[in-house]
Amino acid sequence: MATDYVLFIHGVNIRSDTYANNLIDLIKKTTPIEPLVVYWGNVNEQEEKKLREGYQASSIWNKLWFRDIRKQQLIWFAGDAALYLSRYIGAKVAAKVAEQVAKLKDCTAKDRLHFVTHSLGTIILFDLLFSSRWDQKGTRGRDNVMDIREKIYGVTGNVPNPEQGIRLRSITTMGSPIGIFSLMDVNPPAVDAQSDPSKATSTHDITPSLVQLLKYLHQELGESKLPWRNFVHPADPIASPLEGILPGMVDVNRTYINLQDILVPADLAEDLRESMPRGILDLTLDLTAEVLRQTAFAILDGGHAHDIYWQSPSVAEGITQLIQQSSLS
């Protein structure tokens, strides 16, 4: 019997290795999965502690507003974002991902892999899988990156062995700023499809290798499209819609992926919907949204909204549907 492995990787502001537990429990209510949970939120603790102490040593520290946010959420965000820029820290994350992917060593070609990526975790995972900046021998973290790529069918850049590597069957992104990769895309998809990823013009351009993987999967899966669901909370400032970006990067002819942006219901809307007539509800939500947009509350609520995906029944339902559909194809 085939196994559905689900690789979870978090993004900014996550500081607990139980971050995916609620979402996993929701999925398992109806669908058996083998979760692979990557937790990398603690790899930069010492550096963040030094930065926090440096802020608090300032003579003006006690006069600043939002001190709690400055010394926690903003430092976490800055520290986490540095992972993508620092090869030293990035190599630590590669080790964390490799530790989970190593559990795929006994999988078969009939087993299925699903990505569930959050926030900066999307950028980190796609960088590890597709960026040529890890290709040079002797690079810190390279061995772990190569181990990760070899266990996933079609990622290494070579013509894949039909008997080797688990097949990627769906991608779910949540609160992800992956649209910024479009700023690093140097060639149109048609050129990327014919390019040797190891000779990429930009070492941070993931598109040649990603297009190549999608091409292999398209052939392997009987010309079917890889399902990709992108969940966006309306108050999440980090999340980006992808329907108008990603096809232009990797699938201009809409051949390889079935991509949908999905709006996650805001908590306020859900609460009010239970107790208000439709017309009054619409007006209330419009007025509330306008107030939030015009005040600092929007910024404060954004941090909560950015993490809400891990507890969302609608996100769990979307992931469950993808897993169940993959077992039928």
Image (cartoon, grey):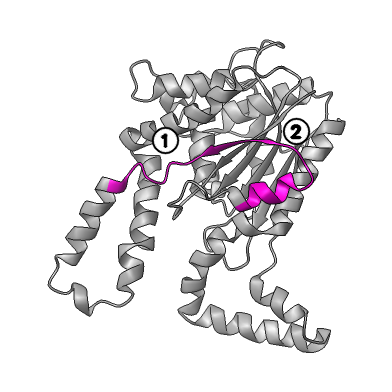
**Quarter the N terminus occupies:** top right
Can the viewer see residue 242 in this picture? no
Whether 206 is drawn above or below 195: the answer is below
Q: Magenta stretch: give its range.
A: 22-45
Whether 243 is drawn above or below 95: the answer is below
Query: How many other residues sit within 10 Å of disc 2, few (<14), some (14-19) or many (≥20)?
Result: many
Q: Provide residue 250's location: percent of width, then percent of height.
A: 65, 36
In the rendered image, which residue does mark 2 sit on? 256
- Earlier sequence position, callout 2 versus callout 1: 1
Residue 93 bears which disc, if any? 1
Q: For the residue marked with disc 1, what is the amino acid?
A: Val
**Quarter the C terminus occupies:** top right
From mark 2 to mark 1, how far is it between C-alphas? Answer: 29 Å
Can the viewer see residue 94 in this picture? yes
Residue plotted at (77% across, 39% down): 323
| Res. 136 image quadrant | top left
Residue 323 bears which disc, if any? none
- Left or right of 58 on screen, residue 13: right
Residue plotted at (30% across, 72% down): 67
Whether 40 is drawn above or below 224: the answer is below
| Res. 2 image quadrant | top right
- Left or right of 199 on screen, residue 172: right
- Taking depth in this image into account, of 159 and 33 the one nearest to the observer is 33
Residue plotted at (78% across, 86% down): 276
Tell me the element at label 2.
Answer: loop
Tell me the element at label 1.
Answer: helix
Residue 44 in the magenta stretch? The answer is yes
